[in-house]
Image (tube, rainbow, N blue to C red):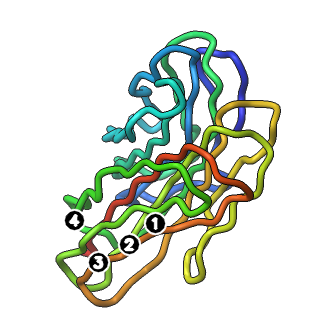
Amino acid sequence: RVLNSSSSAAQAFPANVASGSLLVVGGSLYNGTIAALPTITDTLGTTYTVVKSTDIHVSRICSYYAYGVAPSSGANTVTVSGAAATDWAFAIDEFSGQDATPLDADGGSSTGTSTTPADSVISTVSDCLILGVMTHSAGNISITPDGGWTQIGEFEDGSTNAVFNFVFQIVTTPTTYTPGWTIGSSQDWAAQSAAFAPA
């Protein structure tokens, strides 16, 4: 979902979500001053934990991810909101089989200026879900996830400052995992990662 210069943006899941599923949101935002932590809600009343990366590009753009456990089944629309005149871009997904307290490890965030954004997280249990999300300071340059990562969503069009790429991988062994990408030219970037435990 992409929306320019608005205080909120909404995206519906294409099918009913299941009670107890892990719902995830990942994307980027830009508001011209300091990118504040977004608020995320949905029509099922899910409680989301939102984690923002370090602001980049003169403190105006950041990546973020959010997660929550669906309290019931049914149709569901996710709304991301915050300061007015914000450019938003984000994607949503649903995963089953996670622990009741899903977060295993927060990888924090990394920033840099290069063509290879990346961030690492150390999982502590087997069979984790690893998420990674990144943004950069340019517009319509290519973003390619590293091999082994499945893309949930992306936006790389020059019509907004809120470009992003959101990926996942299911892993078996507790160790260090590094979601990474290649972008079309050297840019300021921010990336972050997290590991979610199975039931």
Res. 199 mark: none
Instruction: Tell me the element at label 3.
Output: strand
Between discs 1 and 3, the one toward the N terminus: 1
Residue at 53 percent across and 49 percent down: it is 113
- Amino acid on which disc 1 is placed: Phe
The residue mark sitting in front, 1 or 3, is: 3
Determine whether label 1 and label 2 are within 8 Å by CB.
Answer: yes
Identify the residue position indicated by label 2 in the image.
129
Measured as percent of width and height from the top left, residue 79 is found at 55, 31
The residue mark sitting in front, 4 or 1, is: 4
Measured as percent of width and height from the top left, residue 131 is found at 43, 63
- Amino acid on which disc 3 is placed: Thr
Instruction: Tell me the element at label 1.
Output: strand
Measured as percent of width and height from the top left, residue 150 is found at 59, 73
Identify the residue position indicated by label 4 in the image.
104
Between discs 2 and 3, the one toward the N terminus: 2
Q: Quadrant of the C terminus?
A: bottom left
Callout 2 environment at 10 Å: few (<14), some (14 to 19), or many (20+)? many
Between discs 1 and 2, the one toward the N terminus: 1
- Amino acid on which disc 4 is placed: Asp
The residue mark sitting in front, 2 or 3, is: 3
Identify the residue position indicated by label 1 in the image.
95
Between discs 4 and 1, the one toward the N terminus: 1
Nearer to us in this view, 18 or 88: 88
Between discs 3 and 4, the one toward the N terminus: 4
Identify the residue position indicated by label 3 in the image.
176
User: From the viewer's perspective, is 115 left or right of 185?
Assistant: left
| Distance CA(mark 2)–CA(mark 3) | 13 Å
Nearer to us in this view, 157 or 50: 157
